Amino acid sequence: MTRGLVVMLGAVTSVALGALAASLGGMQETPFPHEAHQGLFPLCTGCHEGVPLGDVADYYPEPASCNGCHDGVREATVAWQGPAEQVGNVSFEHRAHADELATAGDPAQDCSACHIPTGGERLAVADEVQLGTCWSCHAHEATDHQVDAECTTCHVSLAETRFDLARIEGLPTPADHESATFLSSDHGRLVQESAGRCATCHTQERCVTCHVDAERDEIATFPAAPPGMELPASGAHYDVPASHVERDWLATHGVGATRDTCATCHTSDDCVSCHVPPIPNAVRALPARADVVAPGVHVAARAPESHERMFFPQAHPTLAAAGDASCATCHEESYCVGCHDAPMQGGYHAADFLSRHTASAFGRDAECSTCHNTQAFCRECHVEVGLVPAGGGRLGPGYHDDGPLWLIRHGQGARQNLESCASCHRQVDCVQCHGVLGAFKVSPHSAGFDAERAWARSPRTCLACHVGNPLNGN
Amino acid sequence: MCGMPFATRTEAAGRRGRVTMAGRALRRCGSRARAAGLTVAVALLLPGSALAQSYRGWTSTSVQVVELRPLGLDSVPRTDVVMDAAGRFLYEGNEVSCVLASVCTGYLPLDQDRTLAATQDLSLTFWGFGVEGLSVTALVRARARAGADVVWPRSDDEFDALFAYAQLQRGPWRVRAGRLDIRSGLGFAAFDGASAAYSLRSLHGEVYGGRSLARGLREPQNEALRGLDGFLLDMSVLLVGASATARPWSTQLTARYQREILSDRSSLVSERASVDFSRSFPRFRLTGSIDYDFMFEQPGKGHITVSAPLADARWLAEVSARRYVPYFDLSTIWGFFEPVSYSEVTARVGWAPQTELGAWVSGGWRTYGDTETTVILRPMRDTGWRADAGARWRAAAEWSVDGRYQLEWGPGGFLSSADAAVRFDPTERVTVSLNAMTFQQIEEYRLGQGRAFGGGVTGGYELGDRATIALGASLIRHRDGGNVFTSPWNQGRAWSSIRFDLGRDPGLAARGVGR
């Protein structure tokens, strides 16, 4: 177990050292030969007096100070000009670190802890920082420097660096970025857990390459690239979530639709390719395509699975009545009118339906009275074409010529298809015989007719045929 | 004219010396109420157009010319009438009644008549008034007519506001006020009033109420039948209703209650409830509906349907059990005449092995309830059945054909009808279709003879992304033992329409076309 830990820690340390060395590689022009000066400088701060003070200007001695010895007489002149300008992303600051140690009650660390390899002589300063010292505290739980170490402990965000394009492109790709689910789900979780880690290598511009919603908190607060920073070209990539291919996705997608859940990929323009005004709040909350950088996923309207089945026209009344709100998602009310109250043929009914509507109406396959007012719509036309005189339905022989004595036989047909009767005949036509003042006083009620209930609930209707309370024999 | 109960015109037709009386020139009233509705709509729209940030809608103009051959109660000399083998008196193939010795009467075809009906629809929705969730929606319709005496239904009704309302949607709440139109398991109900709806996840509830409008007419019930009938309501009708929708366990379920009473509360006009549901199972879908009439304490219309895709959805089988009973509210006497229900079983099978090819066949059988009426001479039929079969084939990207045969055979009516059509789409924007049809039918307890044949052509053209134009014409000829030119179904039709989409439609590009 212990051996394994040692090996693992060694590996981690090696990788970390390599990475840090790489990031520091550009700092020093020519390494200063500290060991050759061992006898001259008893204290590191003799030359690096600014380090403990946090005074960056005095981190290194002036090159001219070398001339005190290297004057070409006593010692040969040197061309040491101090370290080159640092272009890195390490955030370590000696003074702050010393303060943190003191605050934490940890012992102070001298320069050798980080700059001289273990067991080395004084001033045997290594070219690289001894990162093992860093890891001894900061990375004792990390298994991969680029995956689970806390980047911000040592690094600044990419936006704070002055990395050029080559430097940015050379940044290593952490192992966890190779996961198949990294783009679809993992990276969102990681950025919420530690946005600083992401910002070490990325700027806000990378987020909005794909994300439609630039105002999302995680993105809006993400460091943006400074002016002039050249970023690698990157294309948008959108995975189709598993939920989106479920059979009933189209029907259920509105349940959890919010800006947070949808605006990663979609703009409000996508929604209104189906949704009709008045636009739902969830849709209006999404950004418009014109206002975003990312291309987003373009959605085209398509009918739900149920609409593509055969016999949908027969099924849709019940589907609409059972879940009215879902129809209104895509259809305006005027859409229904386009068929159900079409101004001319070719709407709900097939072309030339009028010529042959009689039998269909008699069978009530389409339940005419759902849309039409039988007494007005049907009768109005029947009067116009002369099927019935405007003054009243004709009760003598003529129209109903399917057999003799229609008038005294009509009861069965009337009870079966009373809507058809009312499409020509007025109420007064019937009352002529069925009313108490009519010629024959033929009761139109069945044996089980509840007269008491009828009189109690709708006496005015009773009075169309009766002259008073029918329960009193009127 | 509105003050007169009826407007009857006696037509002294000189055709062949007969006396004819056609019942034309009947006009409903209530246009003032409709104009008021339109005024409300316009009043809502004008400030809307001025203040709204966005609007969307469409306008559609349609014109149709209809040729009809009206029937008229005619008298003909007895000497011109012959008797057929069945003992019927016939005049030019049409049966007449010969009670008197010298004159026979019957409903006979009159001269050809032609009328033109024009409709202008305007549908608009405005939103973005600076008040979150506020919108205004209206669909108004104007009509005009020209031509002969025949009036196409409702073409003399000059203005209608089909619906016009303001809506405020805030979170789960939605409130509407104005002219509303509710389509539900109880049919279509229009009213001038308000509704409030609340949605929480898969739950949706709504209450509504107002002055009830006659179905299909958008006029107050006490005005809608003026001029059409003698017994009229003398006051308006109030409507209240409520509905609840839930989606438990993949089931869509809506229950609704609706009640109408006279405005003085003296009488009930209707009181009904309905339940509609749909549920998808792994192998089939179940849909059903039932309504209940509290006035008569009995169930009304209802059905339950099982629909199952088979063989990777190449087949679809459907079985439906249905009950139908004519429904009349109590604004008329018809409901107290107690129409009987019929029960029907229907089976449908569809076959669509690929998107280019499909066919279906269906059959249904129904039986009527006991009418409790006295049988005189012979009983009438109390069963009926219907059959329907069709197929479609998209032979190529541009060509498709489809055909259908329909048979309906029940008490009082018969129809045998066939249609065929060929559609040609030479480009994405152009559609041309040729169709042919033939049918034979018997109207309500009226004998019919001969067969009608017809055909027509329709065309459509998309003018850019926001306009569509459609044209069509058809011709029907009735063959009846050589009396072709006196047959009632001889008629021609022609129509055209143009539609423009208006306003902001950011989804237009995504849809590819301006639909």
Image (spheres, coloured by chain):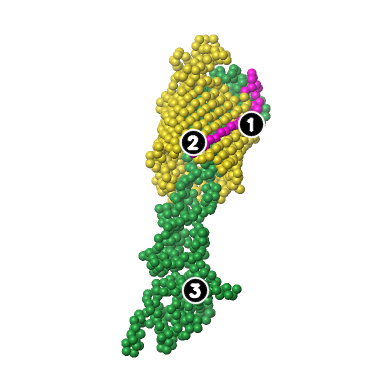
B405 relative to A40, above or below: above
Taking depth in this image into account, of A258 and B233 the one nearest to the observer is A258
Which chain is disc 1 placed on? Answer: A
Q: CA distance from mark 3 to mark 2?
A: 71 Å
Dot 3: few (<14), some (14–19), or many (≥20) neighbours within 10 Å? some
* Labels 1, 3: front one: 3
Front position in the image: A16 or B497 = A16
Q: Which of label 1 and label 2 is nearer to you?
A: 2
Evaluate if marks 1 and 2 touch, with contact meaning CB atoms under 8 Å apart: no
Q: Position of residue A449 (x, y in %)?
A: 66, 29
Mark-to-mark CA distance, 1 and 3: 99 Å
Residue occupying the point 43% across, 71% down: A89
Query: Looking at the picture, do discs 1 and 3 lie on one chain?
Result: yes
The answer to whether residue B412 of the structure is visible from this angle is yes
Determine the chain carrying the residue at label 3: A
Amino acid type shown at disc 2: Trp
- In the displayed structure, does residue A373 sit left or right of residue A73? right
What's drawn in magenta, residue-wise?
B356-380
Residue depicted at 52% across the width and 72% down the height: A11
The label number, if any, that marks residue A455 in the structure image? 1
Q: Tell me the kind of residue under disc 1.
A: Trp
x then y, percent, for residue A395 = 56, 20
Q: Marks 1/2: CA distance?
A: 59 Å
Residue annotated with mark 3: A14
**Colour yellow, chain:** B
Label disc, if present, on residue B393 of the rendered structure: 2
Q: Numbered disc 2: what chain?
A: B
Relative image position of residue B218 (x, y in whole percent): 49, 35
**Closest to the observer, A174 or B292:** A174
Q: Position of residue B435 (x, y in %)?
A: 46, 30
